[in-house]
Amino acid sequence: MKLKTILTVFLFAISFIGFSQSNCKNLKGCERKLCELNIKLTAAKKAGNQNQIKGVEDAIAQTKKNCTTKTVNKDLDKKVKEKQQKVNERTADLNEAIKDKEKIDKKRKKLNEAKVELNKALAEQKAK
């Protein structure tokens, strides 16, 4: 009987967390940020992590005090710029690797040409 009760409570908690996370996705701006922080707070309380509880409570207080559409948009803009910079860096790395491959191919071609010339010279030497 106890196992069944524990299992029921556990499944309810999991479905509640999943439900609340999906509800946050329907929100925008400061409301979404607060919703996500409240989910973190619930998880921290459930885990009994006092340091995390304090940190999330502070984040909630700061968000309530300072959050505006402008600050949320600024945070999102910053995130997009960081991700764009990462894409730019990876593109440059890829282009450099392509150039290096082209250099290797040119060097390999020159080596093969030199070997052909060597073989011709060896053949001429043997013919004498």
Image (tube, grey):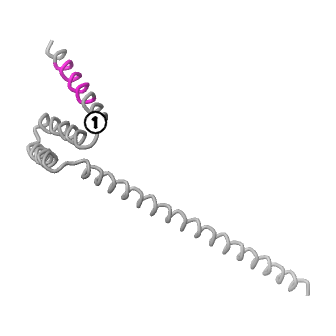
Write down the quadrant of residue 110 in the picture: bottom right
**Looking at the image, is 35 positioned above or below residue 101?**
above
- Where's residue 118, x and y in %? 78, 81
**Residue range (magenta):** 6-18
10 Å neighbourhood of mark 1: few (<14), some, or many (≥20)?
some
- Magenta stretch containing residue 70, yes or no? no
Residue drawn at (20%, 18%), measured in percent from left and top?
Answer: 8
Write down the quadrant of residue 47 in the picture: top left
Q: Quadrant of the C terminus?
A: bottom right
Between 88 and 53, the one lying in front of the other is: 88
Residue drawn at (41%, 61%), measured in percent from left and top?
Answer: 85
- Where's residue 88, x and y in %? 46, 62
- Where's residue 76, x and y in %? 32, 51
Between 20 and 26, the one lying in front of the other is: 26
**Looking at the image, is 71 positioned above or below residue 119?**
above
SS class, disc 1: loop
Between 66 and 16, the one lying in front of the other is: 66
Q: Amino acid at mark 1?
A: Leu
Q: Left of 123 or right of it: where is 74?
A: left
Q: Quadrant of the N terminus?
A: top left
Would you name the residue on which mark 1 appears?
A: 27
Query: Farthest residue toward the bottom?
Result: 128
Secondary structure mostly seen in magenta is helix
- Where's residue 21, x and y in %? 27, 33
Total label count? 1
Residue drawn at (42%, 57%), measured in percent from left and top?
Answer: 84
**Looking at the image, is 35 positioned above or below residue 102?**
above
- Magenta stretch containing residue 13, yes or no? yes
Query: Farthest residue toward the top?
Result: 1
